[in-house]
Image: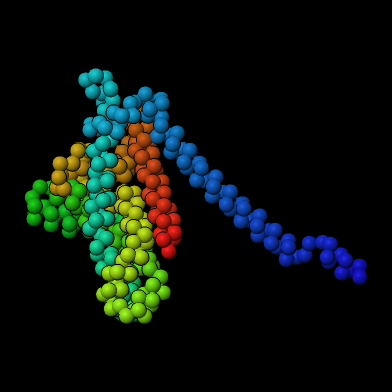
């Protein structure tokens, strides 16, 4: 009886293991949370230093078209205009998503509706291969193939938004395709076919309509990948901080300017703070993309 009473009143070995596991879990969660907060704090403080320490106008920073932080204009103000890079970043991101989405939907429909077994067997390894290719390889292929092709076809240098769009199109295609494949539950298809609908009626009136929230989420994830891509775009965009006047004019994105300029500045100076302000814009855009994904996901779950 004393042994039974002792076992009932004292924690068992399994309880100790459970408490130990919870402690490790909470420790990992706290570490990750601290890491995220530290990154947000570091980028935010560095990015805001341009406006708080160097007293640069936020409006001039967002609307200016001249970028040369080391020099002053005729009025004595630093030439920190990020508008060309912001416009170029959004241009290549939106265009890449617009071009990639129809191809991704076509591949996803072929894999799930037209030839599920054969499509998955053939296309799934190809998609996984595209995901695993490093960014520098995409950039090198774009520099060796796409840029000369554009130069011979349309003239100019070949560098510009069009080259960046084509490179990002290939890079975001597997992301949009993979997420679109999982957008529609199987019972929707089964219910439609059981009611007598044909395969094309099921695809057009059931699959695509019910998959709209998932497809939009996939597109936003692809745009987030394209917006934050640096190396591949840097190799084909031209890296000229100029307001783009067409798809063939060399320009520069936020990420390409960061990668080319961050190693040539001194910490705490105006040129360095200006680059951290560009990084802050990228961080805010990533947060916007994540918020959009959550909003669309909640609306999709409510409709279902």
Q: Percent x, y for residue 250?
A: 18, 44
Task: Choose between 57 and 218: the one closer to the eye.
Answer: 218
Q: Is residue 127 above or below residue 291?
A: below
Question: Up-down: is 270 above or below 107?
Answer: above
Answer left or right for 25 relative to 14: left
* Nearer the observer, 181 or 96: 181
What kind of colouring is applied to the model shown?
rainbow
Q: Please, which residue is most extreme toward the front here?
A: 195
Report whether residue 121 is seen: no
The residue positioned 28% from the left and 52% from the top of the image is 232
- For this rendering, which residue is in front, 82 or 129? 82
Image quadrant where one finds the C terminus: bottom left
Residue 245 in the image, given as x and y percentages of width and height: 15, 41
Quarter location, residue 137 = bottom left
- Picture mark count: 0
- Residue 87 lies, in percent from the top left, at 25, 41
Residue 174 relative to residue 1: left or right: left
User: Looking at the picture, how far across and down is residue 140, in whole percent?
Assistant: 24, 56
Question: Residue placed farthest to the top in the image?
Answer: 75
Q: Relative to residue 12, is residue 287 depicted above or below?
A: above
**Quadrant housing residue 110:** bottom left
Locate the N terminus and report the quarter of the image it occupies. Answer: bottom right
Residue at 41% across, 74% down:
187
Identity of the residue drawn at 70% across and 58% down:
19
Residue 296 appears in the picture as rendered: yes
Q: Residue at x 21, y 20 (%)?
A: 74
């Amino acid at each position: 009886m004393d042994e039974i009473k002792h076992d009932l009143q004292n924690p068992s070995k399994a309880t100790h293991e459970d408490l130990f596991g919870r402690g490790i879990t909470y420790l990992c969660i706290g570490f990750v949370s601290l890491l995220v907060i530290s990154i947000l704090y570091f980028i935010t403080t560095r990015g805001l230093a341009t406006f708080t320490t160097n007293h640069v106008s936020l409006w001039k920073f967002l609307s200016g078209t001249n970028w040369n932080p080391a020099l002053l204009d005729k009025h004595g103000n630093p030439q920190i205009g990020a508008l060309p890079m912001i416009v170029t970043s959004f241009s290549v991101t939106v265009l890449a998503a617009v071009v990639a989405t129809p191809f991704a939907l076509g591949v996803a429909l072929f894999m799930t509706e037209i030839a599920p077994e054969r499509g998955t067997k053939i296309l799934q390894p190809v998609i996984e291969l595209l995901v695993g290719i490093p960014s520098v390889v995409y950039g090198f292929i774009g520099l060796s193939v796409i840029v000369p092709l554009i130069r011979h076809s349309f003239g100019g240098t070949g560098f510009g938004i069009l080259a960046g769009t084509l490179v990002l199109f290939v890079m975001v295609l597997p992301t949009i395709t993979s997420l679109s494949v999982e957008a529609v539950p199987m019972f929707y298809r089964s219910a439609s076919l059981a009611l007598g609908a044909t395969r094309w009626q099921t695809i057009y009136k059931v699959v695509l309509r019910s998959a709209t929230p998932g497809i939009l989420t996939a597109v936003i994830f692809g745009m987030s990948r394209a917006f934050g891509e640096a190396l591949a775009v840097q190799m084909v965009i031209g890296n000229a901080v100029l307001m783009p006047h067409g798809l063939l004019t060399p320009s520069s994105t936020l990420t390409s300017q960061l990668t080319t300029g961050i190693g040539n500045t001194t910490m705490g100076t105006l040129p360095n703070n200006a680059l951290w302000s560009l990084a802050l814009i990228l961080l805010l855009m990533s947060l916007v993309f994540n918020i959009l994904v959550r909003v669309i996901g909640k609306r999709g779950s409510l409709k279902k």
